[in-house]
Amino acid sequence: MAIKYEFIKECKQSGARLGRLHTPHGIIDTPTFMPVGTQATVKAMTPEELKDIDAQIILSNTYHLYLRPGHRLVEKAGGLHKFMNWDRPILTDSGGFQVFSLGDLRKITEEGVEFRSHLDGSKHFLSPEKAIEIENALGADIIMAFDECAPYPADRSYVKNSLERTTRWAKRCKEAHAKPDQQALFGIIQGGMYKDLREQSAKEIIELDFPGYAVGGLSVGEPKPLMYEVLDYTTPLMPKDKPRYLMGVGSPDCLIEGAIRGIDMFDCVLPTRIARNGTAMTSLGKVVIKNAKHVEDFTPLDPNCSCNTCKNYSKAYLRHLYKAEEILSARLVTYHNLYFLIELMRNVREAIRQDRLLDYRREFFEKYGYEI
């Protein structure tokens, strides 16, 4: 198998898991946050900077790389690792979420999804086999099965049909996978917000015996308490000896709550996206640097942060850069936000090691302004 999950311990206070994920390109300490590099780049960051902040794994997007520059070009370059000069682990999603979010630009059939490119309107067809062909060519350490992500809200019959198609597609993905000894293919559990459908999906996907499993179809607009409720009854169904991945989640509260519920891996565009819009995550809550109150504020974004941005630049300077539409604004705030989340996960792992993750959650939420 391409990867191996090493269970280290369970937090006595919360039930969260501490582990290590062994991959062809290195070891990942879990729980972990994966910065998103949609188009073979984490926006505003160089690979060297990602190493500076100790990003252990990043995520890239199959749909976007298929459209541009094309998976065969990446393959000719020696794969995604060489193409983007990143020698640590990479995970690629299947492109399913992006295709399904195209709305009127796509049509779902049993065979796959016909869609029009958001770039030039050209017609394309993505099937489970095609998605795996693309992911095999990209060469990431972990690849995702092609699934159907049901929207929220969605009626029961739609979600049931959707999850059953996801199971059939998962089987086709496994059969099409050409490099199981080099790339770990993860199955995705769907089922919307219906407990019995989540149970059905988990049973069907786990029976296919993938080396890892993801919880899909969450963080799609549902209230956070509902997401936590779904995790409460879904993660206990997942194997203890394999990694568990919650897709598309990246706010500090969700990372902590997800870890408490037994999740090992998270990803989200949130920290990089809000950085470009002038918002920083800090230990004392969000800081919106474009606000006028920071005009003469010569203190760092976060007094408790030791990242390069906080050590060297003031909120007044960052606000000036943002108002002047300077590229450096996005770079410096992105650097800070990713550092902040990676440090957060390091603290979560330490709290698990010390059997005090619920205490850590209380302390963090009080400072950040979250309610428990």
Image (cartoon, rainbow, N blue to C red):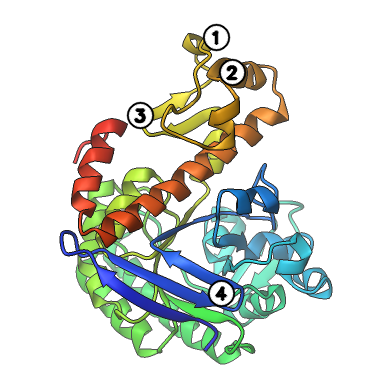
Residue 354 place in picture, x, y as percent: 24, 58
Residue 142, percent across and down?
55, 74
The answer for how far apart the CA atoms under marks 1 and 3 are is 19 Å
When the figure is inspected, residue 346 is found, relative to residue 112, above or below; the finding is above
Q: Which mark is residue 284?
A: 3
Name which residue lies at 40% across and 89% down.
Answer: 208
Q: Quadrant of the C terminus?
A: top left
**Neighbourhood count class around disc 4 (C-alpha, 10 Å): few under 14, some 14–19, many 20 upward:** many
Mark whose residue sits in front, 4 or 3: 3
Q: Is residue 280 above or below residue 36?
A: above
Compute the Cα span from label 1 to label 2.
7 Å
For marks 4 and 3, give the CA distance: 36 Å
Q: Are marks 1 and 2 in contact (CB under 8 Å)?
A: yes
Residue name at image x 46 percent, y 74 percent: 21
Q: Nearer the viewer, mark 3 or mark 2?
A: 3
Q: Earlier in the sequence, mark 1 or mark 4?
A: 4
Q: Which three-letter amino acid code belongs to the residue tagged 1?
A: Val
> Which residue, given by chain and number where applicable, does mark 4 sit on?
143
Tell me where residue 130 sits by quadrant. Answer: bottom right
Q: In front: mark 1 or mark 4? A: 1
Q: Secondary structure at mark 2?
A: helix
* Marking on residue 49: none
Q: Are marks 4 and 3 in contact (CB under 8 Å)?
A: no
Q: Nearer the viewer, residue 372 or 300?
A: 300
Residue under label 2, please give it: 319
- Three-letter amino acid code of the residue under disc 2: Arg
Say whether disc 2 or disc 4 marks the residue closer to the N-terminus.
Answer: 4
The residue that disc 1 covers is 295
